[in-house]
Image (cartoon, helix red, strand yellow):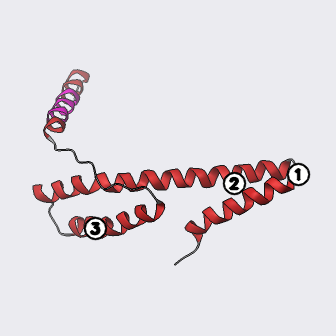
Amino acid sequence: MNLLSKSLLAFIVTLSGTVYASEVRHYKGQDVNTVDEAIAVLKEYNPKLQALLESGELKPQDMGKIHEMTYSMENALKILEGSLKITQRNLEELHLSSERMETEKAKIYGKLYLDDAAFYTDKK
């Protein structure tokens, strides 16, 4: 396939995706404000997604369900991403405090880090 053919094909694929995207219904998704809410959303939707993916051929209505569910799942992951950034920041502050021999700050940031990290390390 020559360069012109490849470019034309890429343009057609892009154009068709753009047209389709404008026809797709968009959703707000569930409001997710806390880590606990984020986990609840993922626990609700991950099994549903898995069941759809394992059901065989994905029908248009399945794709619609997946599309709608992903809005809530994305909202959940944004909260978890924010939580992880806070954990990373607390660890970095602990690291810097240890370099500077700032014992009081190390205690504060060490406790904050451990509290945050417990979410990822403690199995409940």
Magenta segment main secondary structure: helix
The Cα–Cα distance between marks 1 and 2, rounded to whole angstroms, is 15 Å
Q: Position of residue 101 (x, y in %)?
A: 88, 51
Please state which of residues 47 and 103 is positioned toward the viewer in this rendering. Answer: 103
Q: Which residue is mark 3?
A: 50
Please state which of residues 83 and 108 is positioned toward the viewer in this rendering. Answer: 108
In the rendered image, residue 17 lying in the magenta stretch gets the answer yes
Where disc 2 sits, the SS reads: helix
Observer-side mark, 1 or 3, equals: 1
Q: Which residue is mark 2?
A: 91
Q: Which residue is mark 1?
A: 101
Q: Position of residue 69 (x, y in %)?
A: 26, 57
Residue pictured at 43% horizontal, 50% vertical:
78
Residue 59 visible in the displayed image: no
- For the residue marked with disc 2, what is the amino acid? Leu
Quarter in which the N terminus is drawn: top left
In the rendered image, which quarter is residue 83 located in? bottom right
User: In the rendered structure, which disc, 1 or 3, sits on the residue that comes first in sequence?
Assistant: 3
Observer-side mark, 3 or 2, equals: 2
- For the residue marked with disc 1, what is the amino acid? Met
Label 1: few (<14), some or many (≥20) within 10 Å?
Answer: few
Residue pictured at 60% horizontal, 51% vertical:
86
The magenta stretch spans which residues?
10-19
| Count of marks placed on residues | 3
Label 2: few (<14), some or many (≥20) within 10 Å?
Answer: many
Where disc 3 sits, the SS reads: helix
